[in-house]
Amino acid sequence: MKFFRRTDIIVIISILAVSAVSWGIHQYFFAEDKGKAEIYYYSKLVETVDLSNGDERKFSIPQDENVTLQVYRDGSIAFIESDCKDRVCIHAGKLKTTGQFAACLPNGIVVKIVPHKERDEDDVDLVIGN
């Protein structure tokens, strides 16, 4: 009795190929642009951070001083401190690509990466995964 059948291997290779092509298309069309980060507090836009200028800084929004965000020189942003129990927001890591987002739900803070240009209906709404 074989562990894998020939059709199993073909299906696995097909899924990997489609995934690789999808990732490549996304990286080619969307990952090159440095965007801006929009920070929402309970669904209200409270701050916009330009990620393309190469500055590095730590900051908090005035609505919740217990949550600290870090902007990095490479054009990414991340949650680095939070007073929530689960710390899922911190484990989300650096956000850099248009469409990525992270949320600190107990504190009501959402960070989304959006393009610099005005939005249109062809823009990416969100990216799931890294």
Image (cartoon, rainbow, N blue to C red):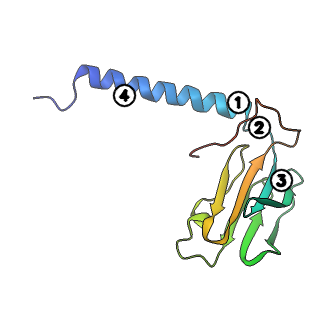
Q: Nearer the viewer, residue 78 or 85?
A: 85
Q: Residue at x 82, y 42 (%)?
A: 115
Q: Is residue 42 above or below residue 65?
A: above
Q: Residues within 10 Å of mark 2 (few under 14, many from 20)?
A: few
**Residue 44, labelled with which disc?**
none
Pointer 1: what residue? 28
| Residue 47 spot, x, y in % from top left | 85, 62
| Residue 50 spot, x, y in % from top left | 87, 54
**Amino acid type at mark 2:** Glu
Q: Residue at x 75, y 55 (%)?
A: 76
Say which quadrant the N terminus sits in. top left
Q: Nearer the viewer, residue 27 or 60?
A: 60
| Tag 2 and tag 1, C-beta contact below 8 Å | yes
Label 1 to label 3: alpha-carbon separation: 19 Å
**Amino acid type at mark 1:** Tyr
Pointer 3: what residue? 51
- Residue 60 quadrant: bottom right
